[in-house]
Image (tube, rainbow, N blue to C red):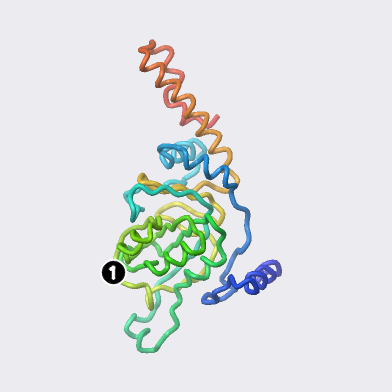
């Protein structure tokens, strides 16, 4: 473990923010910059948020959007924006029955990342898109909410859907299942790069999710993307006014599909 990570780990341990399931050598980052609350609030005001973000990312040559067909909201109508904290997991080699019999330690480790996270963060869990085994459930989401996380996105399945809805905690996932991840999933890296469907997510990326899907904006591109969306929205509002006023096509053409031009 790098020296600065050792210091941060000890700082968080003394503050009671280290759960201790995952080996500290598997933690890639603890402290990293977050997006300001003011910028997050501006994104939340955007009507079709992930649609607008996806278009701007396309114009920048960045693959950062996943369709709601692949990552569906457990509670429709929710909308979240926050920086990513990540965990990557792999399947256990033993059968679950053998794990129960051997009284193996449960290695899912979601609580590790919740207590290290900052309020407003979004938990991103990567279990390879497995739709059968739960990466988190109601109890896990209760801990996440108590730690102030804004929501969770799972490249895998979740369970306890009724409990999650009752908790009113926003979650997106590849599917839902009754099958526990205990003795089936092992967390092998915290706050390293992960995959959501077919896009890369780095810890600190700004995650956005709504009914249309999920987007990830690289941390250093967040303010540019917001500025571009606000500019486009103003131009498209002007175009709507021109359309409603039945203006000639020569006035409409220069504004058409301007959102796809990053220049």
Q: How many marks do you count on the picture? A: 1
**Residue at (52% x, 39% y) in the render:** 42
Q: Residue at x 59, y 65 (%)?
A: 28
The image quadrant of residue 129 is: bottom left
Q: Position of residue 171 (x, y in %)?
A: 39, 57
Q: Which residue is mark 1?
A: 178
Image coordinates of residue 93 in percent, x first then y, are 39, 78
Label 1 packing within 10 angstroms: few (<14), some (14-19), many (20+):
some
Vertical arrangement, residue 247 with respect to residue 129, above or below: above
State the residue at coordinates (38%, 49%). 78
Residue 164 relative to residue 85: left or right: left
Residue closer to the observer: 216 or 162: 162
Q: Quadrant of the C terminus?
A: top right
Q: Find residue 11 and report its image quarter.
A: bottom right
Q: What SS does tag 1 mark? A: loop
What residue is drawn where x is 56% and y is 42%?
39
**132 to the left or right of 45:** left
197 sits left or right of 29 in the view: left
Percent position (x, y) of residue 82?
A: 51, 51
Q: Quadrant of residue 12?
A: bottom right
Q: Is residue 27 above or below residue 263?
A: below
Q: Position of residue 193 (x, y in %)?
A: 52, 59
Compared with 193, 38 (above or below) is above
| Quadrant in which the N terminus is drawn | bottom right
């Amino acid at each position: 473990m790098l020296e600065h990570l050792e210091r941060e780990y000890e700082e968080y341990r003394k503050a009671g923010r280290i759960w201790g399931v995952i080996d500290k050598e598997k933690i890639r980052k603890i402290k990293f910059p977050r997006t300001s609350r003011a910028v997050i609030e501006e994104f939340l005001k955007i009507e079709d948020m992930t649609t607008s973000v996806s278009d701007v990312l396309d114009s920048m040559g960045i693959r950062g959007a996943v369709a709601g067909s692949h990552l569906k909201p457990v509670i429709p109508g929710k909308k979240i924006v926050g920086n990513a904290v990540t965990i990557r997991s792999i399947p256990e080699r033993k059968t679950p029955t053998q794990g129960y019999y051997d009284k193996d330690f449960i290695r899912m480790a979601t609580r590790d990342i919740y207590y290290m996270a900052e309020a407003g963060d979004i938990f991103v869990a990567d279990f390879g898109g497995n739709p059968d085994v739960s990466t988190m459930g109601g109890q896990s989401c209760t801990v996440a909410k108590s730690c102030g996380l804004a929501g969770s996105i799972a490249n895998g399945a979740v369970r306890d859907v009724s409990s999650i809805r009752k908790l009113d905690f926003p979650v997106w996932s590849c599917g839902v299942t009754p099958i526990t991840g205990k003795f089936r999933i092992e967390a092998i890296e915290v706050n390293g790069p992960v995959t959501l469907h077919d896009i890369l997510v780095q810890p600190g990326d700004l995650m956005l999710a709504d009914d249309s899907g999920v987007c990830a904006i690289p941390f250093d591109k967040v303010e540019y993307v917001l500025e571009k969306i606000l500019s486009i929205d103003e131009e498209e509002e002007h175009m709507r006014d021109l359309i409603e006023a039945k203006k000639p096509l020569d006035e409409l053409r220069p504004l058409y599909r301007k959102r796809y031009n990053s220049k």
